[in-house]
Amino acid sequence: MSDATAAYMRITNLSSSPLRLIGADSPVAKTVEPMITTRKVHDGQEIMGMQSAEELLIPAGSSLELKPGGDHLMIMGLRVHPQEGDLIKLTIRFAPGEQRFDLEVPVRKEEPK
Amino acid sequence: MSETISDNKQDVGPVVSSAGINRRLFILAASLALALLVGFLFSRYSAYRNVQESFYGQALVPAPEAFDFRLVDQDGNPFLLSQLRGKVVLFSFGFTHCPNVCPTTLSDLAKVYHALPEQDRQRVRVLFVSVDPRRDRPDVLKKYVPYFDKSFIGLTGSEPQIAEAAKAYGAFYEIARDPTGGPDNYSVNHSAFTYLITPSGKWKLIYNFDQLGDATKMVQDIKQVLGEPI
């Protein structure tokens, strides 16, 4: 099994000022980093890649969609190999300030329909 | 159609000396020939349109012979694509440290595979070809690829073997190194297509990453390819 995986979610900023997702932590992994998926064209075909992002912006009143094949939280250096149905603790950090948001995300093999 | 012509010839045989009948016979034969030609062209055109329109994936017309890559499977055994002659093969290039695109591809393909009826699944194989042979040794692939479905096969090989396979299918990949990272800390940018090989070893269809999510349409393509005469 790979020692890396990704977390997906939709985060809605209900406040009236912009929020920036600046990082995340999980007890099951060494690091969790916001990543953006890049698509560039090389010789007429699309090449997908990813880049570590300093922050992901969530404008006031709108949502950030982290989804398979798109932007995501990359979970690296897994200490355990979670099984389908397990819940993983994730703490997401936002700026400005030291805002932290704790959540438990279910492990899935396939994207829910 | 040809029977009609010979029947007519027999019927009008005794009066063939009449110029008027001869002329009518000629017109009849000419119109029959024209009808046959139009019918033939129309059937070719329909077949052409079929190829163009009835596949969800992008069709290669005419489908070329699939390059018979020689790689190493997740058990460390030599593996030739042609070993799977008689089956529909779906494969993509990727790497196991890929957290997003590759697992999404494999999980989409697992969904497609599970949506097929049991008897069709026996004639379909899914392969995952690593473009990161440095880290993706057979034992690494063995723990990763069958996770999505136990029938899925991970393949690796030497760098030239992988480069040859990728080139044959027009796939692209490049190591993307983080300057602050260690020697094993890198990502691989790659094209994310899935290729469909027919049971007779023809490279027939290409899917882009975003198409894989529609399992119903993927299943329709696979069933259609399985139903074609080998």
Image (cartoon, coloured by chain):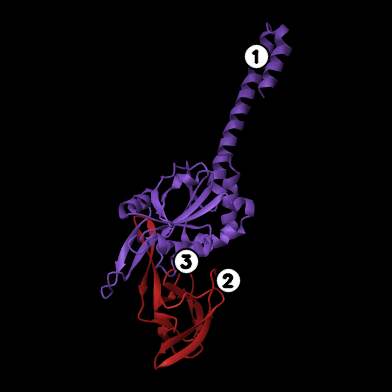
Chain colours: A red, B purple
Residue visible at 34% across and 51% down in the picture? B161
Q: Quadrant of the N terminus of chain B?
A: top right
Q: Are marks 2 and 3 in contact (CB under 8 Å)?
A: no
Q: Nearer the viewer, residue A87 or B32?
A: A87
Is residue A29 shown above or below B159? Answer: below
Place residue A99 in its image quadrant. bottom left
Q: Nearer the viewer, residue B105 or B10?
A: B105
Q: Position of residue B89 (x, y in %)?
A: 50, 50
Horizontal relation, residue B3 to residue B132: left or right:
right
Kind of element beneath mark 3: helix
Numbered disc in front, either 1 or 2: 2
* Cα–Cα span, label 2 and label 3: 14 Å
Q: Report whether B88 appears left or right of B141.
A: right
Number of numbered discs overlaid on the protein picture: 3
Q: Earlier in the sequence, mark 3 or mark 1?
A: 1
Q: Is the residue B22 above or below the residue A69 in the image?
A: above
Query: Is residue A111 toward the left or the right of residue B185 in the image?
Result: right
Q: Residue B169: in sight, yes or no?
A: no
Crowding at dot 2, Cα within 10 Å, few <14 / some 14-19 / many 20+, comes out as: few
The amino acid type, in three-letter code, at marker 3 is Pro
Nearest the viewer among A44 and A82 is: A82
Say which quadrant the C terminus of chain B sits in.
top right
Secondary structure of the residue carrying tag 1 is helix
Question: Do we see residue B188 in this rendering?
Answer: yes
Q: Which residue is mark 3?
A: B103
Q: Which residue is mark 1?
A: B23
Kindly identify which numbered label has been placed on residue A112: 2
